[in-house]
Image (spheres, grey):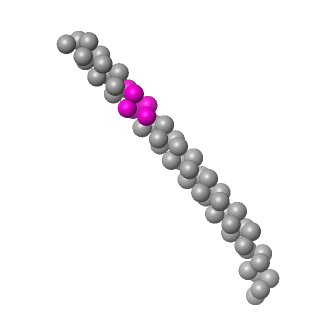
């Protein structure tokens, strides 16, 4: 029984680590999306102003 509890604790730690990794990846993806939006807006900005 103690061995099973150890395995459950190890599995729980693995799940926690995986969740943290997924959260970190999601934050990175969000940052990349924001950068792409900034680049797109920055690239389109002067062209829009020159047409005014």
**Dividing the picture into quarters, in which one does residue 51 lie?**
bottom right
Q: Is residue 45 left or right of residue 10?
A: right
Q: Position of residue 34 (x, y in %)?
A: 61, 58
**Dividing the picture into quarters, in which one does residue 13 lie?**
top left
Q: Position of residue 19 (x, y in %)?
A: 42, 37
Q: Is residue 50 above or below residue 12?
A: below
Q: Name, please, the residue furthest toward the bottom.
A: 52
Q: Is residue 34 left or right of residue 17?
A: right
Residue 29 highlighted magenta (yes or no): no
Residue at 35%, 21% (x, y): give it: 10
Q: Position of residue 5 (x, y in %)?
A: 25, 18
Residue at 77%, 78% (x, y): give it: 47
Q: Is residue 50 above or below residue 22?
A: below
Q: Name, please, the residue furthest toward the top.
A: 2
Which secondary structure type mostly characterizes the magenta part of the structure? helix
Say how many tags the image has: 0
Residue at 30%, 19% (x, y): give it: 7
Q: Name, please, the residue furthest toward the right.
A: 50
Q: Is residue 27 left or right of residue 19?
A: right
Residue 17 highlighted magenta (yes or no): yes
State which quarter of the image contains the N terminus. Answer: top left
Residue at 76%, 87% (x, y): give it: 52
Task: Pick the residue in front: 49 or 40.
Answer: 40
What span is colored magenta in the figure? 13-18
């Amino acid at each position: 029984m103690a061995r099973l509890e150890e395995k459950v604790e190890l599995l729980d730690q693995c799940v926690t680590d995986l969740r943290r990794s997924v959260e970190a990846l999601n934050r990175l993806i969000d940052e990349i999306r924001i950068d792409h939006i900034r680049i797109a807006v920055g690239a389109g900005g002067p062209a829009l102003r020159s047409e005014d």
